[in-house]
Every structure is written in structure tokens, then in C-alpha cells.
Amino acid sequence: MSTYDRSMALTGQPPTALSRNQKLATLIGLFGLAIVLLSAFNVNFPNKGLWLSVSLSAIATGIIWFAWDAYSKKEPGIKNDGVWFKSISSKGFWGWVAGIALTSFYIILYFYPEYLGLVAKGSNKGVIGLFDPLSRALSGNPASQWFVYGTLYTVAILAFGIKFMWKYRHNRYERIRTISVMFFQTGFAFIIPELMARLNGSSVLNGGSLPYYDLKNMWPLNYYNFEGYRIKGFLSSGDIGFGLLIFGVLTIFVISPILTYKYGKRWYCSWVCGCGGLAETAGDSFRQLSDKTVKAWKVERWVVHSVVVFVTLMTTAVVYSYLGTDTSKYWLTKSTFLLGVAFLLTLVFGLVMLFKRKQLQKDAQYGAIGYLVIILALIGIHFFSGDGNVFLFKSETLRKSYSFLIGSIFSGVIGTGFYPIFGNRVWCRFGCPMAAILGFQQRLFSKFRITTNGGQCISCGNCSTYCEMGIDVRAYAQKGENIVRSSCVGCGICSAVCPRGVLKLENGPLQGRIDSNQVLLGNDVDLMSLVNKK
């Protein structure tokens, strides 16, 4: 008798009971987690390095073994695996439990690290004390709550990344980009910055102190990179520090725009970014929970671009606060800097309105003009404020407000803690200023698009269901319309789950990239006319 599952139900089947291997894998993973939890209650392990190794190995082994048993015996290809029947992946009881647990962890991590065992003066205790041996081995320093978080973050991306590659093993693009985010998180975000700390104070750096630097992060994600203490740290660290400072500037104005023009925002959001890496790997089971309504799309546009304005004002105010006023001593003075910011923003908005206005809807045009007027007006007001004040507020007040509201609450507590409730890319959709800036470039200037073959679409809805950014991909596919959206991170899952090969990620010429009129009118696109133009 055949054992093949010939069901054609697009929603999948109700989940079966866990297999013996999955139960054993769960027990091993829980054992590793139990060691961390016991350390939170100040259980004193005799050999912390050994017990930490056992804990992290058990957690990773449990995840990988569970994933291997779940996917290795299945035929390659995407199956829905009953995601709408499982409590944890359909906003059920266990989904809310997971969301509350993650949110609680982030609240403690950001605001109450002493409960994790952080000791300001003295030896660390609890969870942070458990991670001390690993931290000292890498950087020579005791662990902090951020080292603990970085370690767990990296283990999660590596373990769930292997699970992700087994699940999507039929798709070469998904395998390669997953290896990419695993590499950048492990090397550029975790190991290299820790090893760089050993260079601090050495003769190579002329006695300077090199700031901790996640090499894959750029402004505005590392919004603190241009604060006074960071600039002093770079400049006091010799050629290496100065080189890192120049690299940080080049990533904003040169490297990022060029790569986005050629490949779209996916080069960063889906191949490099740690936030995206965690969302794609550990958060993969929740991608279908993203809100696809028009209302959510409107909220997304206004909120995420407001965050961009916020971080721009904050960074400008911080840099302004430590610049000088004497033109005989400083070539970059307070007034010169603000006028330069005003000129750059006016130039960008002016060029967009002059050459790309038709690609923006009316509310987007009005919003862009409104934001520009507000920023320029606030810059003008600085002449009437006292020294150290700009935009009617002290720079430190703006920085702390942004750090608390966006850097902590949005990106951590809500952005990751609410995976099981709002989907895995809630931070990327609604709060990430980097995603908004890259999306702006992608929508107007990039070669990237997702092409569709409307004649092959069977309207199954898989593409829209599994779009983590809340895009109704099916609506484009049904019309044979190229998909060019600011929010699209180019993860390629819509293409991977399509049973007919309708969707394809491409980098092509800008001509024929967008045909907005046809979409707005609801007409079918004449594919032959597009072919004849080539």
C-alpha cells in the first residue's frame, strides 16, 4: 500500500503527534535551556565553561535534530505542514505563551540586567556569570547582558538556519542566502568585534581604545556611531580607527546605494542583516502571521518613515552638539553642518520630485514634502536656541528618547518578542529606519523586481500567505505585473512556495520595471507588448 500523501489541500493537514526522535530532541533542547534557567536562580556550577558548552550544544542539537526528523524524510518542496492547525504558529495558546516569554526576556535584558546576574563592581552572577568564560576567551573581558544576548542570538541563527535550509533545500537561492546571514552574524557581528577588543590600548593603536564595532551594521541601525565618544574612540585609535570611521561614512553614501541599485534592498535585509537573519531562521514558522490588509500597509508607510525622520533629527542633533563654532579652528562648524544637512535633504527630495514623482502616490508626495518642510523649519530654529540645543530639544534628550522608544522597545521588545503574534518581520515592516531608506531607493532607483507569469498563476494564494512583509503577491501575479515594492526584502519565499514557477527574482533594466497604471485600473498587462519592446 502506498504511503505517499496525495492530498492537494493548500492549508496542509492537522499536525501529527511528535515522533520518538522529535520527543528526544525536545528533551535535549529543554535540558540545555534548563541549565541557563538554573543559572538564573544563582545555581553555582563548578565549571562554568563546561556547563555553558553543554547548555549551548544541547540547545543547538535539540533544534537541529528536531528539524532533521521533521524535514529530512519528506520530498523536497514546500509543504504548509499544518501551520494554521498548530497553536504556536496560528496565534493560539502556545503562540501567546511564546510571545509573552520572549517579551519578558527582552524587558529584563534591556531594563533589568541585574536580574540576569550583571554586577557593576565585582564578579558576575547568574546567567551572565555562566557566560563569563566564553567572553574572557574571546575579548578578555567579563560578559555583559549584550554578550549573552549576542551569543544566544548567534546560536539561534546557526541552529534554525540549518533547519531553514533543510526545509527549503529544493531552492538554491534560499540555501545560499541563509549561509550568508549565518556567516555575517557569526563572523562580522559576533566573533570579530569581540576579538577586536583585544587590540584596545595596544601599541598598534597608539594607545587608543577601539570602539566595539559590528562591521555589518551601518547608520541608521548603529545610530550611536556618530556620537562624541565614538568619534573620539575612532580618532584616538590610529589608522585602524580612522579607517573604520571612513568605512562607516562610505557605507551610507557609497556602498549601500550602489548595492541597492544593483540588487535591491535584499543585499542587506535578506543576506547580511542580523535582524533579518533571526527573522528568517528562528522566525520562519511565524511568517504567515503578517497582516496583509490595506490598513496595515498604510500604517506601515507612515510609521516607518516617521522613524526615519526621528533618527535623522536625532543624529543631526547629536553631531551638532559636539561641533565647534570657531571657523578659524574647525572647518566643520555647527552652522556649516546644519546647512549641509539641509542642502543634502533638499537635493534628494528635489531630485525625487523632479524625476520620480509619478512613481509616488499623492499621499506619499504630500508626506515627503511635509517631512522636508518640518526638518528644514526645525533646522532654521536652531539659530534662536542656546548652545547645545537644536530642534527645540537637547540632543541628549532626543538620543535617549530614540534609544528607548526605537532601539529598545520597538526593535527588541516588540520587534522580536511579538514574532508569534504579529509575524517575524514586524520590526522590519514598521520600525526599521534602514529598511525604510533602502526601500525608498529600491522603489525608485533599483534594478530589482520580482517578475510574474500571470498565465501560469492558479491563484492558490501561497505567495501572499507566506509573504512576511504583508504584500499581496497574488494580486500582482494574477495580472502578470512586476512586483516593485519598497517593503519587499527579496527573501524569495513567494517564489519558493509557488507550485507553478510564476514568480522570479531578477535584476534588470529600469525600463518596463513599473507599470502602475495597469495595476490601478485593474487591467491585464499585455505581455506580448512588453516582449516586443525588448
Image (cartoon, rainbow, N blue to C red):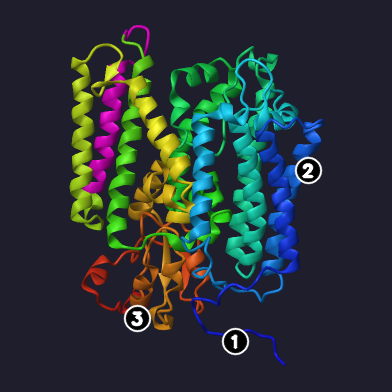
Q: Is residue 462 above or below residue 458?
A: above
Local secondary structure at mark 3: helix
Q: Label 1: how many residues lie within 10 Å, few (<14), some (14-19) or many (20+)? A: few
Quick one: quadrant of the N terminus?
bottom right
Residue 279 seen in this snapshot: yes
Residue 477 percent coordinates (x, y): 38, 74
Q: Which residue is mark 3?
A: 528
Q: From the image, state whether disc 1 or disc 2 is nearer to you.
A: 2
**Quarter of the image holding residue 337?**
top left
Name the residue at 49% across, 69% down. Answer: 84
Which is in the foreground here, disc 2 or disc 3?
2
Judge the density around disc 3: few (<14), some (14-19), many (≥20) Cα neighbours within 10 Å. Answer: few
- The type of residue carrying mark 2 is Val
Q: Where is residue 524 drawn, in percent x and y? A: 29, 79
Which residue, given by chain and number where applicable, does mark 1 sit on?
Answer: 6
Name the quarter where the C terminus is drawn.
Answer: bottom left
Image location (x, y in percent) of residue 413: 46, 41
Q: Is residue 66 left or right of residue 405?
A: right
The residue at the point 50 percent across, 57 percent down is 95
Does the magenta-highlighted stretch encompass residue 348?
A: yes
Tell me which residue sits at (52%, 34%) in the image.
108
In the displayed structure, 474 sits above or below 158; it is below
Name the residue that disc number 2 marks.
54
Residue contact between numbered discs 1 and 3, judged by CB atoms under 8 Å = no
Near-viewer residue (120 or 166): 120
Q: CA distance from mark 1 to mark 3?
A: 37 Å
- Image: 517 above or below 408: below
Residue range (magenta): 326-353
The answer to which image quadrant residue 294 occupies is: bottom left
Which badge, 2 or 3, is on the more N-terminal residue?
2
Q: Secondary structure at mark 2?
A: helix
